[in-house]
Image (cartoon, helix red, strand yellow):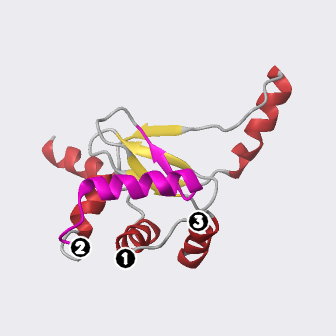
Amino acid sequence: MLDHAVQSLREHGVRMTPQRQAILEYLVTEHSHPTADDIYKALAARFPNMSVATVYNNLRVFKEVGLVQEMNYGDASSRFDFVTSKHYHIICDTCGKVVDFNYPVLDEIESVASQLTGFKVDRHRLEVYGTCPSCQSEQSQTH
């Protein structure tokens, strides 16, 4: 997956720097849908001269190339998701945790929407909200 991402960047004329490589590796290996600040904090010890702006700039490049998806869920910080396949997100209302899930039945939704409305559909987004298991157990212990 990482090799494919690096190749894709090179094909788009993007030069690989050590910081860019580290940010990309972090996104590929961490499935936590991190914010730019999360990535910065995780990599700061390895790259003391790297700024949060460097992280944001690299995320913008990755987004333009189609490697990451920026997710805005109403809070102040965007989260970033390494794009591997079509999937959806369930978000905890309590702690903000984001978890991927796949529901193949929805793969047809764009063509169905297009057929029913005449729209040329470019993309779709589905978010599910609730309370994660950790927060559920914390809530049951406090009641």
Q: Is residue 105 above or below residue 40?
A: above
Q: Is residue 108 left or right of residue 96?
A: right
Separation (CA) of disc 2 from disc 3: 24 Å
Secondary structure beneath disc 2? loop
Residue stretch rendered in magenta on the structure: 47-72
Pointer 1 with pointer 3, Cβ within 8 A = no
Q: Amino acid at mark 1?
A: Pro
User: Is residue 68 visible in the rendered structure shown here?
Assistant: yes
Q: Residue at x 63, y 59 (%)?
A: 85
The 10 Å Cα crowd at callout 3, few under 14, some 14 to 19, many 20 or more, is few
37 or 105, nearer to the observer: 37
Query: What is the spatial separation of the Cα atoms under label 1 and label 3, in whole angstroms?
Result: 16 Å
As shown in the figure, which amino acid type bears the numbered disc 2?
Answer: Phe
| Residue 9: image location, x then y, percent | 57, 67
User: Dot 1 corresponds to which residue?
Assistant: 18
Left or right: 142, with 66 as reference point: left
Q: Quadrant of the N terminus?
A: bottom right
Label 1: few (<14), some (14–19) or many (≥20) C-alpha neighbours in 10 Å: few
The answer to whether the residue labelled 2 contacts the one labelled 1, judged by CB atoms less than 8 Å apart, is yes
Residue that label 2 marks: 47
Check the picture and name the quadrant holding the C terminus: top left
Element under disc 3:
loop
Label 3 belongs to which residue? 13
Could you tell which of marks 2 and 1 lies nearer the N-terminus? 1
* Among numbered discs 1 and 3, the one appearing first in the sequence: 3
Q: Return the disc, 2 or 3, that comes first in the chain's sequence.
A: 3
The residue at the point 74 percent across, 37 percent down is 109
